[in-house]
Each structure stands twice: as structure tokens, then as C-alpha cells.
Image (cartoon, rainbow, N blue to C red):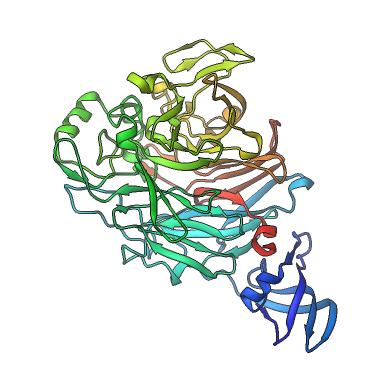
Amino acid sequence: MIRDGGHVVTDVTVRIVPKKGGQEIKYEVSDAQVRTHGGIPVFGLYPDYQNTVEVSYTKSGWGKSERVEKEIYKIYAGPVNLDQGGYATEGKLFQAKVKKVDPKFKDRLILINNLSVAPYAHTSQVVWNNPMGGALEWNFAALNAILDTTGEVRWYMNPTAIYDAENIYKAGVMMGFRQNKDGAFTWGYGQRYVKYDLMGREIFNRRLPTGYGDFSHAMDPMQNGNYLLRVAKSDLARADGKRVRTVRDVIIEVDENGKVVDEWRLFDILDPYRDNVIKVLDQGAVCLNIDASQAGKTLSAEDLAKMDESDHFGDIAGTGPGRNWAHVNSVDYDPSDDSIIISSRHQSAVIKIGRDKKVKWIMGSPEGWKGELAKKVLVPVQNGKKVACEGSTCEGDFDWSWTQHTGWRIDSKSNKDVFYLSVFDNGDSRGMEQPALPEMKYSRAVVYKIDQKAGTVEQIWEYGKERGHEWYSPVTSLTEYQADKDSVFVYSATAGAQFNLKTGGFESAPNPFIEEFNWGEKEPALEIQLINTQGFQAMPVDLKKAFGN
């Protein structure tokens, strides 16, 4: 912060002078932001570097006013002071290989939301007491930073003030980062959901409501100022009388004061015993439960039957409440009809559900859906004609999404009748089977066009199939439309992990790909690859929102 010195400071512009060949950061600061912070917020300094910062502003007080056109500060920012473990390379928080930057995208600033996987000094593991189960054990430390398009770190989060790996109510994987319309960021971790601005100012930091637990993956800011959180029930009495903690299968809506105004209990709305996808999942990578020794193995009907007869509950792939039958990894809101859209990894389906808790449509393979739910499965079309499908396989280029992440509405292109959907199709269990060779797996970024009246779905864009296994991300990742540049941003977040078939272990963390595409184009206008890091999500940061509100 450059303090206001006791003056009224207005009309502020900040410029971080770039290194030679580096990326300029320049932004305007609203008068409200100056008042809020007691001065001029300085964002985007290079670490371990004597930065040159130019500011212009108007200074007034006691009836006098003075315009300062350029004031220069020399500000040293220390090196990234964040414990790193596992696969950190070359003393950097992230090692980035910049492969392509179209001039249209050179001003991009990209928030990286990654994980520090074990071995790591400040990572711990805890589980809820069985037989109730739950999904508390994800407690990887956070690696959150903002990169520019030259691969330089320009901001990072030191989470120690709000994170404690040894306290279950202050630990957990940081996930679900979204930049709100006021410029601040919301996300959750473990048993908390929070909101902070880019300067680290706390807006709120709350425990989950008492009846719910185990946040992960998704916190969506709604247009009405409320938030959708992907959680679980802390205590559920099943139909058989058993009491369980459920796993990633409840959505709650909380208002700005933390009151729960609504809930979607997916085990009541969907079929928690649909096992078609569960039986063909690669058990070596069930989201972040990575176990190389189980790579390529699947569950049989007998395995599931034995599990269902037992009291074995918790974060395990299985059927029924209390097990990981749904694995919802994103939630979005459609204000045109007051509905939510969820991505269920373990059903390989993106599903729209109304406020009345009725399913509006299912974008996924028709196999295994029963009764009224079977009627909600969308019909694939291409160029106005129905696509011929048999089971889970369709002719032509159309494909369903498989163990997908981020099923999000493209708001600026959608209306109450036509729904544009962006999805990262991870690709495990594609076609409701495991391929003959693991190297045959691939992932895709996809955009679908859904005619909600006709109940049809058309695949209008895809990328990744042509990249083959090198671009394959078994878990995590993101596909998101960016209205400011009419583009599609993609993060293939767990691509390129080196696996040793002899030892059954990983020799490196993944090497994720960041890409951004002009709408409709098949080749990326921006491509950056990160080296040796466990990716979760990434997204552009808007400084106009952050400092202009």
C-alpha cells in the first residue's frame, strides 16, 4: 500500500514498470478502493526484485487540489516465501514454459489454483470416525498464485494466516475460486467458505453451517448475491436406518449473512444407486484419491453388492448415500429459470435441476437412467438431424462428457430457450468402458448447445482429442467462456504425469496445459505449460473488477 499521507486521494492510476521483455500491469483504482485501503493498492510486483512503480492521482484537502501526473516509487518485493514440497523446481513457485501468446491475450493475468501434494511438511490426513464416513481427508496445502503471460509470478497467497493443517476447522484443500462481480474472490476449504480481496482484506471467513460439512470443488456466486456451495450432509438417516455422513452430494444456497435459504439433496433427487459409471471408473484416479497401484482396475457388480451390504462408508467410489456415488465437482446457476446446473463426475453427467428439485435435463449417456429420469436425457443432434447412438457411443464427432469437470452455463450466449454449456471432458470411462491400453485415453474441452424446449444437445466445439494422451487429465481441470475476449479458457490440470509401470508409482507431478481460444477456433491463441505441479483449476483475473469497483 502507498498510504494517502492524510490527504484525500482520487483518480488513481498505477503502473508496474515491466522487466525487459516483461508484461506491463496497469490499472485504475476507484476512489472507493482508495478509501477502503487507506491509500493506493499496489498489485503485481515482481518477487525478489527492485520494482519501479508509477502512480498518478489527485491530492486534495483544505480547499486545495493538486494533480500528480507521475510519481515514481522503488519498491523491493521479497522472494516467494512459501513452503514447497514434492516437485518444486528451480527454486520457483511455478516453472512455466510459454509456448504461444497472441497479442490479443498478452495482457492476461492467470490465477493458478493448485495443490501441494505429499510429501509436504504441512500436509496432514484426517478422517471422520467410521461407520459414519465422510470426506474430510483431503488436506493438501495450497499453491495459489497469479502468473502473467511471460510465466512470471506477480502475486501469490501465503495462506498461513487462515490455514492450519493440524486444525480440521482451518484446513482442507482450497477450491472453487471465483472472482465476484465486486472484484473480490470467494472459495472454500474443508469446513469453511471465505471471501477476500486481492490485497488480502477479509470480507468474511465462516464455518460451514452446522448441518453440513466437507466443502470441496465448488462455490458459485449467484446473481442475487447469495452463494451455492457443494457440501455434504453431516448426519443423514438412510432408509435402512443407518446414520452416515454423505459424500459430495448436497448443494446449499446461503445468503450474504450465512443463512441457509435452500438445499438440493441429490440422493433424493437423482438415483444414488445408478452404478453404470461407478463400475467402469479407473480406481487409480478417483478424483484426488490418486493410487497408482490401482491404475486400470475397476469395480465389479459383486464388489458393489458387498459394499452395499456392509457398513463401509466414506470417500470411496460406491453407490448409495454415504459413499462417493455422485462426486459433484461444479455447480452453476441459471437465473432465466431459477435452476442449478451440477457436474456429477461419478455419473458422467451434467444435470439441470429446478428450484422445485425436479430434474429438467440430463446431459450424459442414457445408460442406466430409470423412470422419469430416463425421460430427461437429452437427445444428440448435429446439423439439425438426430445423431445415431448405440448405448454410450454415438456416430460422427458427437460424444458425451466422461468424468467431467466444470459444467458451466455461458451466460452471455444463453437465454431461457437455448443453453450454451462449457465442459472439461476428462475422459475416464469413455464409452462406459476402460480402453485396451491406458495410452488410448484422452481429454477434451467441449462446448455444447442445448435446446431446452426440444430436449436436444449439439456439440459445437471441441479440443483435445487430437492431442491424445499427452493432454489427458484423469482428474480436475476447467473449461470456461470469457466474455471480455469472446474466448474459451482451458486448463488441462493433471496432464503429463510420469507413471512407472514397474514400481506402480508416479515419477513426477503433472505438467498442466493452459490454453485460451478465440471463440470457434481450433488452435489456441495462448498456450503455457506448467512443469511438475498438481493442478486443480486456473482462470483469468480481471483487474478492472478488482480495483475499479
| x 19%, y 34%: residue | 307
| x 26%, y 40%: residue | 323
Tell me residue 269's x, y (percent).
34, 33
The front one of 534 and 190 is 190
- Asked whether the viewer can see residue 265, the reply is yes
Q: Where the C terminus falls, by quadrant?
A: bottom right
Quarter location, residue 68: bottom right
The front one of 175 and 236 is 236
Q: How many marks?
A: 0
Is 70 left or right of 415, judged from the image as shown? right
Against 64, residue 182 (above or below) is above
Tell me residue 222's x, y (percent).
52, 48
Tell me residue 174's x, y (percent).
44, 56
Q: Where the N terminus falls, by quadrant?
A: bottom right
- Asked whether the viewer can see residue 41, the reply is no
Against 432, residue 314 (above or below) is below
Against 197, residue 429 (above or below) is above
Is 328 left or right of 388, judged from the image as shown? left
Is 390 left or right of 34, judged from the image as shown? left
Tell me residue 450's x, y (percent).
56, 25
| x 44%, y 61%: residue | 257
Most extreme residue toward the bottom is 62
